[in-house]
Image (cartoon, rainbow, N blue to C red):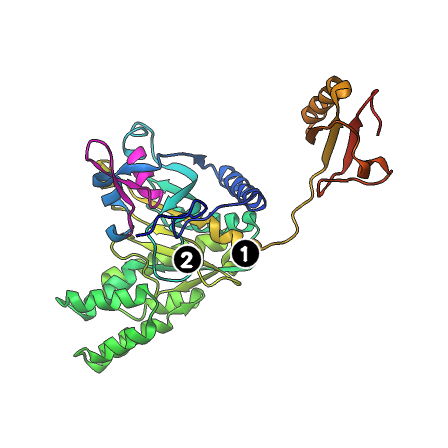
Amino acid sequence: MSKPKVFEKPIGVKDYLPNVVKKLRAVEHKVLSCMEGWGYEQIITPTMEFYDTVGVASSTSDAKLFKLLNNRGTTLVLRSDMTAPIARVVSSLLKDKQFPLRLSYHSNVFRTIEEEAGREAEFFQTGVELVGDSSPEADAEVVALAIASLKAAGVERFKIAIGHVGFLNGMIEDALKDRQEDQASLKEKLLSRDYVAYKAHLNQLELSDAVRKELSDLLRLRGGEEICEHALTVSNNNTAREAIKHLCEIWAVLEAYGVCEHVLIDLTMIGDFSYYTGMTFEGYAADLGFPVVSGGRYDNLLSQFGRPAPATGFALKTTRVLELLGNDQDEQLQKTLIIYDEHGRLEALQQARALREAGNHVITNKVSELPAQLASSGDMSYQGVTYSVVKTYVGEGEKV
């Protein structure tokens, strides 16, 4: 392997230049402020965690974890999400805090390179976890907050699709009793949204025509409230029916929030079926193929850290939101340039301090003489940058 050039960086990571950082921080601030308005308090956890605790508990597959060894030979991981680290904190440092807990975060997370185009090894997430509440009200709250967060971030056109893993688990397990391999295969195809492969595999299975039709008709269970009501007539499986009842209650709460125009029911959505235990959802922006937000209920995670509790939450894909915001012209800040020489240094720097204390953006620059391009009146550009105000303290006192 050849030695990397001095300007190269690992594949899957990127540099964020000042104009992008400005947008990133603006999105971060607006979204976290929105979350704070809903009662969520921000938390920060370490970039590195133990593999045997947070790494194993994470929803990220083992093959996608960045692993490293410390000087004692212990395996560590770079955090691949924020849910598992927060579960660790809730079960330890916050173990005496009463439920429910509402926590928010903005962090960079790491996952090894995936083959699909557009995937990054390091990216930013902004999200929340609502721990200690198993009600439909809690699930509806995080969906409504996800909608509010997308709006706060500046995303205007989007749809949130919600489903329930209990419905699909109940339907598929009821139809394919004791056929775990076929169950897993169908779920994997739904997880990857490969509906052609799902139907192809379904046609290969030895099933009655009625069961085959029932599993095939799952692909049509997408729409509004009528889908939720229709699903109750599709199956007699108790797990599936309880899941739909829960989803119907979530929809009713979302109606009270007044956000159903942004929501559709998609009963083909299963999320990570090894991780989520109830409602799951994804949000898609009109101009981007990848989801910009995802989340759901994960009631089994906290028990791995010794404090069993129901939980639900979501993560906003902040890096993808930046792609949606595009390269629109940045809001121009009022910038002041103060140029001075040795004679005007004291007055110039005192003036700069006063302006900064008043909230202005001020750049100072020492020169030996007044630049020629500023000698003519009305020219506010210097070294390729245009300023709102230019003051010079060159020679005897202020000149401009």
From the top left corner, tell me how far across and down residue 162 is, in percent.
40, 59
- Of residue 240 and residue 397, the one placed in the foreground of this image is 397
Q: Amino acid at mark 1?
A: Leu
- Of residue 48 and residue 339, the one placed in the foreground of this image is 339
Inter-mark Cα distance, 1 to 2: 16 Å
Magenta run includes residue 359: no
- The residue singled out by tag 1 in the image is 324
Relative to 23, 278 lies left or right = left
Q: Residue 357, located in which quarter of the rendered image?
A: top right
* Residue 258 appears in the rendering: no
At horizontal 80% and vertical 39% (from top left) the residue drawn is 373
- Of residue 54 and residue 278, the one placed in the foreground of this image is 54
- The residue singled out by tag 2 in the image is 282
Quadrant of the image containing the C terminus: top right
From the top left corner, tell me how far across and down residue 313 is, in percent.
38, 46
Graded by Cα atoms within 10 Å as few (under 14), some (14 to 19) or many (20 or more), the crowding at tag 2 reads: many
Relative to 315, 360 lies left or right = right
In the rendered view, tell whether residue 328 sits above or below residue 29.
Answer: below
At horizontal 57% and vertical 42% (from top left) the residue drawn is 18
Q: Which residues are magenta?
A: 64-89
- Provide the secondary structure element on which disc 2 rests: strand
Q: Earlier in the sequence, mark 1 or mark 2?
A: 2
Q: Amino acid at mark 2?
A: Glu
Graded by Cα atoms within 10 Å as few (under 14), some (14 to 19) or many (20 or more), the crowding at tag 1 reads: some
